[in-house]
Amino acid sequence: MTTRLAIEFVSDIACPWCLVGLRNLEAALGETAGEVEADIRFAPFELNPDMPAGGMDRASYFAEKYRLPEGEAKARGEQIREAAATTGFTMNTGPGFRILNTFDAHRLLEWAGEVGHQR
């Protein structure tokens, strides 16, 4: 007998740890060999509501938010890239990579969901 789960996945679309968690959840569900079927509903969460529209340099952001030296902040970025890579996702975060405000992106996804359900 298949067990049905309703999972509400609360995340910010620009959060790499959210992506890693989602990929790991999908992998775990894939290993259930049909014993578990999940309906995943995505719910928005804005990690950085005070982020300026133009965003911030990633390393500077980490250094400020977590009160880290710039070098350690850059190392944290590498740890995130490595974690994402283990799930098959390549993060393209070269020099000048910025953390952006995601409010409008969440609004767009909400609108797209509404329009998509109208058909």
Image: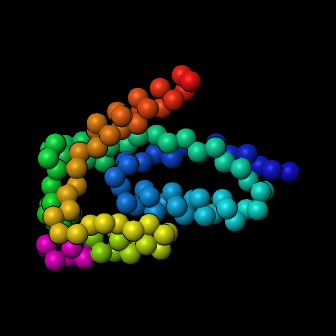
- Above/below status of 21 relative to 84: above
Q: Quadrant of the C terminus?
A: top right
Q: Is residue 53 left or right of residue 7?
A: left
- Above/below status of 23 relative to 3: below
Residue lying farthest to the front in this orientation: 119
Which residue does the image show at 37% across and 60% down from the upper left?
A: 16
Q: Is residue 80 left or right of residue 37?
A: left
- Above/below status of 16 relative to 107: below
Number of on-image labels: 0
What colouring does the structure picture have? rainbow
* Among the 4 quarters of the image, the one containing residue 44: top left
Main SS category, magenta section:
helix
Image coordinates for residue 62, horizontal then vertical, percent? 20, 63
117 or 49, which is in the foreground? 117
Residue 96 within the magenta-colored segment of the rendering = no
Image coordinates for residue 101, horizontal then vertical, percent? 23, 45
Which residue does the image show at 77% across and 57% down from the upper left?
A: 34
Q: Is residue 115 left or right of residue 52?
A: right
30 or 71, which is in the foreground? 30
* Among the 4 quarters of the image, the one containing residue 81: bottom left
Q: Which residues are magenta?
A: 68-76
24 or 116, which is in the foreground? 116
Image coordinates for residue 56, horizontal then vertical, percent? 15, 55
Which residue does the image show at 22% across and 50% down from the upper left?
A: 100
Image coordinates for residue 4, horizontal then vertical, percent? 73, 45
Q: Is residue 95 left or right of residue 26?
A: left
Which residue does the image show at 21% across and 73% down from the upper left?
A: 74
Residue lying farthest to the right in this orientation: 1
